[in-house]
Image: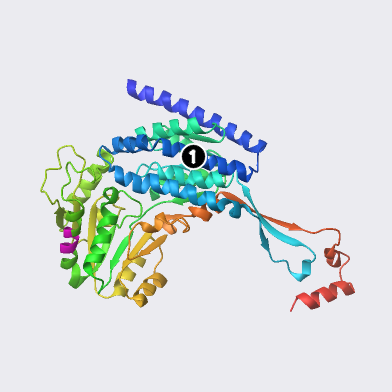
Amino acid sequence: MGATVVQLTESKKQIQHTHRVFESQKSAFRSNPMPSLTERLENLKRLKRALLSNQDRILEAIDRDFSCRSKDESLIAEVMPSIQGINYTLKNVSDWMKPSKRHVSVLFQPASNKVHYQPKGVVGVIVPWNYPLYLAVGPLVASLAAGNRTMIKMSEFTPHTSALFKEIIEAAFSEDLVSVITGEADVAADFSSRPFDHLLFTGSTSVGKLVMRAAAENLTPVTLELGGKSPAIVSPDVPMEDAAQRIAFGKAFNAGQTCVAPDYVLCPADRVQAFVDEFRSQFAEMYPSLRDNDDYTAIINERQYDRLRGYIEDAQAKGAEIIEINPARENLQDGTRKIPLTLILNTTPDMRVMQDEIFGPLMPIVSYNGLDEAIHYINDRPRPLALYFFGYDRDEQQHVVHNTHSGGMCINDSLMHVAQDDLPFGGVGDSGMGHYHGKEGFLTFSHHRAIFTKQKFNSGKFVYAPHGTAAHKMVYKLFIR
């Protein structure tokens, strides 16, 4: 009872703090609604310096939150893309800021058309637990490049990283420019109800619907980066070593706790056993042991661990074949929160592992006969955040590209499309809406303001009332044909 009261009191304080900071940022934006290129570059450089000078502390904090998170994975997936994203933006933001010229019809000459990219105002960012640094920094970089003020709600499931990131940001920026909010789910719910000028949410589809519903009350535009069941198609003739190795990398990275991790494999029926054998071999080469291997990341918390164990038990009870890949045959069920990479064969649609996004090291394998059958299987389900095709036949590659939908896609690789600075990242349908990263991030957080300009000569007077004049008839004759 006492702990509940303390939590409610702390949540109330956090909510009040959120409201105060929001008003402060709104006021600051009104005082400087169009930050200069110099200001934007300095903000980005300040963020880069702060991250570089604290990278060891960041790695340690993420490791503590997961109980075991590979520091190399954190460098590869959190620190490096954050720094590279800043570097890419520093090189390109001056070009992105330039107004773009647009065509003017002869009907309206002499005049000019331009699109100016104007900061939206105060941007809200809601960060998930799986990549707590990168999924905070990526949107922040885009928001600062576009000239906005930014409020970031960190996940309550990564308390050490959230507290450290708050400390880092407070030391680098004034509160009315960038602010980090911590707190429980009720703080996040209130955060999403603030009348932001744009709101970006990364997380589950179910929570994304709640965020969008709250934003709708304020007509706040939203970018939703969700998830879904991202398939990996193994073609009939791709070398199995190539496909299995790259899929194993994508699935084992962060123990599958990645929104674009391969969720399940579509494999030709006559190649399933070959895939299982090669996958087992490739995984064992990357992770010869699991229990005390710092390269193999633990599940974030007991709730997620129990969910994943429940998927395995449910599938097994319904007739699935469970293949646990535990190269050193270690006991992992005594508090490590590590789950071996587990292949699941003979799945059926009623199994929970085939209904929900897995977000962990479980890999169902679905057999198919003919590539079009695999494509139909994907198209019969909600559109995923990512799709992976493994095969070197270019006609097959294009056939899959043209006949499927997904947020993004890799051909003969997994995960790596997310790390491309000049590719947009975003979902479609159930996997989200809107894009960011690189130029698309700048555009997402900018208002595209259309400006039509004319000077003294006024060609428009030829269509002013009274109507029916010779001038009107000439205009109609010239332009309605």
Marks counted in the figure total: 1
Answer few, some or many: residues within 10 Å of disc 1's Cα (few below 14, many 20 plus, some between 14 and 19): many
Q: What is the x, y in percent for residue 431?
A: 41, 55
**Quadrant location of the N terminus in the rendered image:** top left
Residue depicted at 24% across the width and 57% down the height: 248
Q: Furthest residue to the left?
A: 329
Give amino acid for label 1: Leu
* Main SS class of the magenta portion in the image: helix
Verify whether residue 282 appears in magenta. no
Residue 184 in view? no
Q: Secondary structure at mark 1?
A: helix
Mark 1, residue position: 47
- Position of 474 relative to 310 (above/below): below
Residue depicted at 27% across the width and 55% down the height: 251
Q: Furthest residue to the top?
A: 2
Q: Quadrant of residue 34?
A: top right
Q: What is the x, y in percent for residue 446?
A: 59, 50
**Quadrant location of the C terminus in the rendered image:** bottom right
Q: Nearer the viewer, residue 228 or 104?
A: 104
Residue depicted at 24% across the width and 51% down the height: 361
- Position of 238 relative to 168 (above/below): below
Residue depicted at 30% across the width and 63% down the height: 232
Q: Which residues are magenta?
A: 276-281
Q: Quadrant of residue 163?
A: top left
Q: Nearer the viewer, residue 274 or 333?
A: 274
- Position of 122 relative to 408 (above/below): above
Q: Quadrant of residue 137?
A: top left
Q: What is the x, y in percent for residue 315?
A: 19, 54
Report whether 46 appears left or right of 247.
Answer: right
